[in-house]
Amino acid sequence: MLMTKQRRPAIRTLRGWAISVLQETGAIRECEEHGWAKDRADPHAREHALDIARQEPPEGLSPDQAAAELRDVLNSIGDTCPECLPSPD
């Protein structure tokens, strides 16, 4: 008898969902060397991410709650990688 497993959702946490939306819209990117998320400071990408959060919130969240979660995650991400050496001035 062939048994099938139910697939787990690709994103398991709200933070994971928010990071996915932010990456999809180009609001954040990954440090090529270390993998840390970095804020691109692109206002158009941020607004697009917020539009997606409001229009397609995760199940159980209101559009305002989804946008707030996305903002919280974005505010926790810096614009530099903590492992990269600072460039000499």
Image (cartoon, rainbow, N blue to C red):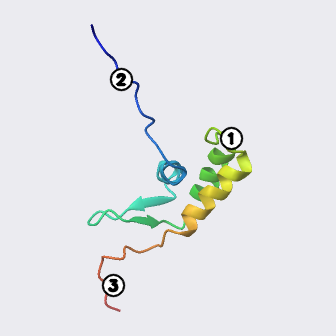
Image quadrant containing the N terminus: top left
The image shows residue 42 at horizontal and vertical percentages of: 55, 63
Dot 2 crowding, Cα within 10 Å, few <14, some 14–19, many 20+: few
The residue pinned by badge 2 equals 5
- Eye-nearest disc, 2 or 1: 2
| Mark with earlier residue (1, 3) | 1
- Eye-nearest disc, 1 or 3: 1
Q: Is residue 46 above or below residue 85?
A: above
Quarter-of-image position of residue 59: top right
Judged from the image, the secondary structure of the residue bearing numbered disc 2 is loop
The residue pinned by badge 1 equals 55
Q: Is residue 40 above or below residue 7?
A: below
Q: CA distance from mark 2 to mark 3?
A: 47 Å
On the picture, is 30 further left or further right than 74? left
| Mark with earlier residue (2, 3) | 2
On the picture, is 88 further left or further right than 16? left
The amino acid beneath tag 2 is Lys
What residue do we see at 40% from left, 24% from top? 6
The residue pinned by badge 3 equals 86
On the picture, is 89 further left or further right than 70? left
